[in-house]
Image (tube, rainbow, N blue to C red):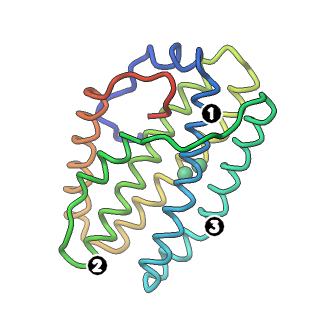
């Protein structure tokens, strides 16, 4: 359903479970970045009415997610701490095509957002179905459902503003690239991606 080319290595949940505090911290930053990248979409593409209309409530939702994860961290006695380097997102941004006008730039940004939502959703599903801690399974299930909706919304926005063939072709390129990235990135139990 998400179109991802390579499923997450099944060992990831077992490794992540052992350092779940680190996963929660990284997750908190993912939510923070989702909110801030939503704001930057609204600022940069303010003349695209659908973008403003759809992304504005998403920002509120992502900020709500950030607060939820912070609360969970606090409950467990963990602090947010400094932000870490996000190799996954950095590599995706490096894959982005520069130039080609504003609409092309909108497309690149929407597809990166859709892809991050898709991979996050896939990982939340793994956490929600395979962690031993039942409360955390319920916690992650909610995120999985929400991020699945965001993934769809970003793709729909791309199809709304750009020709179908162009979106399809670029989306496939992103999916292929992301699949190779996932294959090559070290499997880390302290990261969401
Ligand atoms: Fe989120
Ligand atoms: Fe999201």
Instruction: Quickly name the residue at label 1.
Output: 24
Q: Which mark is residue 102?
A: 2
Residue 188 shows up from this direction: yes
- Residue at the image position 20 percent from the left and 49 percent from the top: 173
Percent position of residue 14, x then y: 53, 13
- Residue at the image position 31 percent from the left and 28 percent from the top: 185
- Disc on the earlier residue, 2 or 1: 1
**Residue 125, located in which quarter of the rendered image?**
top right
Vertical side of 47 occupied by 54: above or below: above
Q: Is mark 2 within 8 Å of ligand 2?
A: no
Quadrant holding the C terminus: top left
Give the foreground label among 3 and 2: 2
Give the foreground label among 2 and 1: 1
At mark 3, the secondary structure is helix
Instruction: Quickly name the residue at label 3.
Output: 57
Mark 1, other Cα within 10 Å: few <14 / some 14–19 / many ≥20: many
Percent position of residue 113, x then y: 42, 55
Dots 2 and 1: beta carbons under 8 Å?
A: no
Vertical side of 30 occupied by 129: above or below: above
């Amino acid at each position: 359903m998400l179109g991802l080319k390579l499923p997450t290595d099944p060992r990831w949940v077992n490794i992540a479970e052992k350092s779940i505090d680190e996963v929660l911290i990284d997750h908190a930053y993912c939510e923070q970045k989702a909110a801030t990248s939503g704001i930057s979409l609204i600022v940069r593409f303010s003349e695209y009415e659908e973008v403003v209309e759809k992304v504005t409530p998403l920002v509120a939702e992502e900020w709500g997610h950030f607060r939820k994860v912070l609360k969970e961290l606090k409950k467990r006695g963990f602090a947010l701490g400094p932000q870490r380097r996000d190799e996954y997102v950095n590599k995706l941004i490096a894959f982005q095509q520069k130039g080609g006008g504003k609409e092309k730039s909108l497309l690149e940004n929407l597809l990166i957002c859709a892809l991050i939502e898709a991979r996050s959703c896939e990982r939340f599903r793994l956490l929600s179905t395979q962690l031993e801690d039942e409360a955390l399974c319920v916690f992650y299930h909610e995120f999985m459902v929400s991020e699945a909706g965001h993934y769809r919304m970003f793709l729909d926005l791309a199809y709304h503003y750009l020709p179908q063939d162009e979106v399809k072709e670029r989306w496939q390129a992103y999916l292929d690239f992301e699949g190779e990235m996932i294959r090559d990135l070290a499997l880390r139990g302290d990261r969401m991606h």
